[in-house]
Image (cartoon, rainbow, N blue to C red):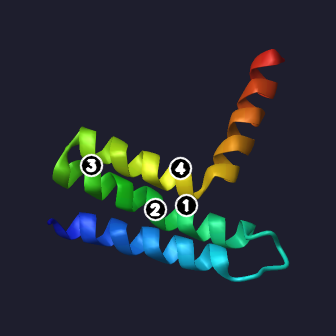
């Protein structure tokens, strides 16, 4: 297993642990931090392992951070409607 995949697994475990901790801000600050760390990590995984593994890691990250993705899709629909 490559170093980038080990980093992704650590990111996934830490994201799940952070989601279990109660928060007053509905976990948004943690989500922003996870996104900021996850995007460069996703690029590293894709560069080291190829686009298929990168897409699998993207899907795994999107499943953990599903609410930011849902809100982003709603925002895109609103922008596209005009």
Asked if disc 1 and disc 3 are in contact, CB closer than 8 Å, the reply is no
Q: Earlier in the sequence, mark 1 or mark 3?
A: 1
Structural crowding at the residue carrying mark 2, measured as other residues with C-alpha within 10 Å and reported as few (<14), some (14–19) or many (≥20): some
Q: CA distance from mark 1 to mark 3?
A: 16 Å
Q: Which residue is mark 3?
A: 46
Q: Earlier in the sequence, mark 4 or mark 3?
A: 3
Q: Which residue is mark 1?
A: 35
Q: Which label lies toward us, 2 or 4?
A: 4
Residue 68: percent from left, percent from top: 68, 51
Q: CA distance from mark 2 to mark 4?
A: 10 Å
Q: Name the one closer to the observer, 16 or 42.
A: 16
Asked if disc 2 and disc 1 are in contact, CB closer than 8 Å, the reply is yes
Taking 46 as reference, is 22 above or below it? below
Q: CA distance from mark 1 to mark 4?
A: 10 Å
Q: Which residue is mark 4?
A: 62
Residue placed furthest toward the top: 81
For the N terminus, the image quarter is bottom left
Residue 65: percent from left, percent from top: 60, 56
Residue 11: percent from left, percent from top: 43, 71
Q: Residue drawn at (84%, 17%), measured in percent from left and top?
A: 82
Taking 77 as reference, is 49 above or below it? below
- Give the label on residue 25, or none: none
Q: Earlier in the sequence, mark 1 or mark 4?
A: 1
Q: Which residue is mark 2?
A: 38
Asked if disc 4 and disc 3 are in contact, CB closer than 8 Å, the reply is no
Q: Secondary structure at mark 1?
A: helix
Q: Earlier in the sequence, mark 3 or mark 2?
A: 2
């Amino acid at each position: 297993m490559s170093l980038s995949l080990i980093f992704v697994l650590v990111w996934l475990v830490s994201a799940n642990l952070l989601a279990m901790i109660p928060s007053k801000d509905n976990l948004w600050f943690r989500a922003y931090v996870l996104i900021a760390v996850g995007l460069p990590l996703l690029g590293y995984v894709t560069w080291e392992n190829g686009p298929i593994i990168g897409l699998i890691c993207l899907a795994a990250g999107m499943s953990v951070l599903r609410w930011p993705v849902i809100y982003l899709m709603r925002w895109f629909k609103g922008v596209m409607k005009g």
